Every structure is written in structure tokens, then in C-alpha cells.
């Protein structure tokens, strides 16, 4: 199975900060990677798919990049609504995998 | 409007079989390149992908759980059913179903149900 490793596990940041989360795949997944945001008690919300395509309705401060084994999610200017946990997910293989999550906390 | 909703028991006993139903609307699983997946999340832990069923009835399972999982669909009822055998307390989790459109390799899981908390306890 493909392993997905996110870093950091926890990130403390302030409103207005630029934030970057990294996701590494144990083997190449081309661009078949999605990013999700999850708030407590809620279902995950799709932010980015195919590594860099912004889902409709998602603010443009979110962006994704990467291909192969290394991917990043960037929030250009952190807003109060962005404090949440973020997950990457590969869907290149037949047995999909999520990363372990990155919690973005208020500094 | 696309919606998905999970239903099933909130409590199961160890060794029992769990059956969950995902009832959806706003799309059809007969549509080409559509799929529905199941994902779970133990309390305070990460998401774990479980299974997927495609419009053409292809099925895919988590490698670590495939001996315990079965996914099926009833297109006439717009439902996808997941069964998991031999339940254990470590299977306590919120179980979600979610949709993915597969053209050009996939769109991400763009619509999710609200989730159902299943507790495994005697």
C-alpha cells in the first residue's frame, strides 16, 4: 500500500500568516492527490483535487502543488475560519490512503 | 443537490457483523465514472479509507481490512451498503460515505454524508 506522510502534525500560526503543509507519498501517485479540511464534529470538506485544482467555492487563499511523491497545501493568509485539521488523500492506487492529518492551531 | 446519508446501528457487540447503508440523492451510480466510498474515523484519530464501489460494479477494499469488508449497491434505491464482519472495540468510529467523480483520474471526494458513530461494546 502507498503510505502518505504529512508534516507537521501540528502547526501553530496567527491570523494573516502564510501556512504550508507537506504530504509525501511512499511511491509516485502522479497528481492524484486531494486535500480536505475538517472541523470538529463535521465531515471533511474537499479543498483541492488533482494536486492543484481548487474545488468550486473554496477561497483562493488555498492552493496546492506537487506531483509524484511530494505535495504541498498552502494557505496564503490564514483566516479565523481556517483553524482546522487538514488531510491529504491519494487516489492513484486501488486502495486509497489518507495522511495522518495536520492540525492548524491558533498561536 | 447532492446529498448522502449514512444509516445503521449505533451500537454493535464484539464479533457481530456491522451493516451500514448510504442513501444518496442528486446523482446516480449508473452514471459513468461515478463511485461511492466508505471512510471511517476513530474518535480523535485520522481518517481511514475502507472501500469503494464504482458505477460499473467494480469494488476496491482497504488492503488491511479486505477480508472483513463487503460493499454492494442497489441502484434502484440509490443505496450503497457496507458490511464489516467480526467487529471489535477498535472498530469504534464515525463511518462516512462520500462520492467521487472519476473523469480524468478523479475529482476528489466532493460530497460526504454527515457520518454515523458506531460503538463496539458488549
Image: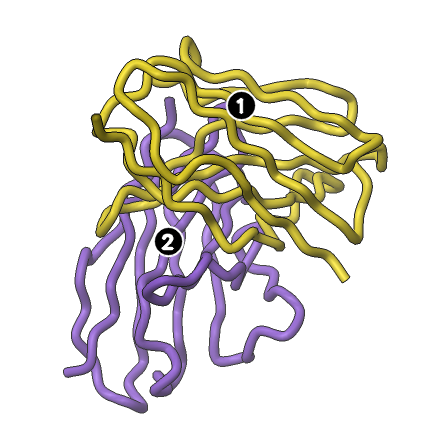
Chain colours: A purple, B yellow
Q: Is residue A15 visible?
A: yes
Residue B91 in the figure: left or right of residue B107: left
Q: Looking at the image, tell me whether mark 2 or mark 1 is earlier in sequence order.
A: 2
User: Quick one: which residue is furthest to the front in this view?
Assistant: B122
Classify the position of the C terminus of chain A by image quarter. bottom left
Residue that appears at 24% across and 63% down: A103
Residue that appears at 44% across and 44% down: A89
Q: Is residue A2 above or below residue B34?
A: above
Residue B36 in the figure: left or right of residue A6: right
Residue B62 percent coordinates (x, y): 43, 22
Residue A12 percent coordinates (x, y): 16, 75
Q: Is residue B77 above or below residue A7?
A: above
Whole-Å distance between the Cαs marked 2 and 1? 19 Å
**Residue denoted by label 1:** A94
Q: Quadrant of residue B58?
A: top right
Residue that appears at 34% across and 87% down: A80
Q: Is residue A59 above or below residue A49?
A: below
Residue A49 percent coordinates (x, y): 57, 54
Q: Quadrant of residue A98?
A: top left
| Subunit ID for the residue under disc 1 | A
**Residue denoted by label 2:** A87
Residue that appears at 40% across and 50% down: A88
Q: Quadrant of residue A56?
A: bottom right
Work out whether residue A15 or residue B71 is closer to the camera in this orientation and state it. B71
Q: Secondary structure at mark 2?
A: strand
User: Quick one: which residue is furthest to the top in this view?
Assistant: B67
Residue B90 in the figure: left or right of residue B113: left
Q: Is residue A73 above or below residue B105?
A: below
Q: Is residue A26 visible?
A: no
Work out whether residue B64 or residue A89 is closer to the camera in this orientation and state it. B64
Amino acid at each position: 500500500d502507498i503510505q502518505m506522510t504529512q508534516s507537521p502534525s501540528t502547526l501553530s500560526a496567527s491570523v494573516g500568516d502564510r501556512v504550508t503543509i507537506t504530504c509525501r507519498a511512499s511511491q509516485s501517485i502522479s497528481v492524484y492527490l486531494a486535500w480536505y479540511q475538517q472541523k470538529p464534529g463535521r465531515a471533511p470538506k474537499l479543498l483541492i483535487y488533482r494536486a492543484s485544482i481548487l474545488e468550486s467555492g473554496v477561497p483562493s487563499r488555498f492552493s496546492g502543488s506537487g506531483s509524484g511523491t511530494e505535495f504541498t497545501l498552502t494557505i496564503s493568509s490564514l483566516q479565523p475560519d481556517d483553524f482546522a485539521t487538514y488531510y491529504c488523500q491519494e487516489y492513484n492506487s486501488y486502495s486509497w490512503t489518507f495522511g495522518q492529518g495536520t492540525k492548524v492551531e491558533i498561536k | 443537490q447532492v446529498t448522502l446519508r449514512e444509516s445503521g446501528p449505533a451500537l454493535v457487540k464484539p464479533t457481530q457483523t456491522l451493516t451500514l447503508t448510504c442513501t444518496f440523492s442528486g446523482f446516480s451510480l449508473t452514471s459513468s465514472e461515478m463511485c461511492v466510498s466508505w471512510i471511517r474515523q476513530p474518535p480523535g484519530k485520522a481518517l481511514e479509507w475502507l472501500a469503494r464501489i464504482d458505477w460499473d460494479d467494480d469494488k476496491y477494499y482497504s488492503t488491511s481490512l479486505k477480508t472483513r469488508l463487503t460493499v454492494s449497491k442497489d441502484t434502484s434505491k440509490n443505496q450503497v451498503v457496507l458490511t464489516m464482519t467480526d467487529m471489535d472495540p477498535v472498530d469504534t468510529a464515525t463511518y462516512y460515505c462520500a462520492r467521487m467523480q472519476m473523469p480524468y483520474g478523479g475529482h476528489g471526494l466532493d460530497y460526504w454524508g454527515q457520518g454515523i458513530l458506531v460503538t463496539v461494546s458488549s
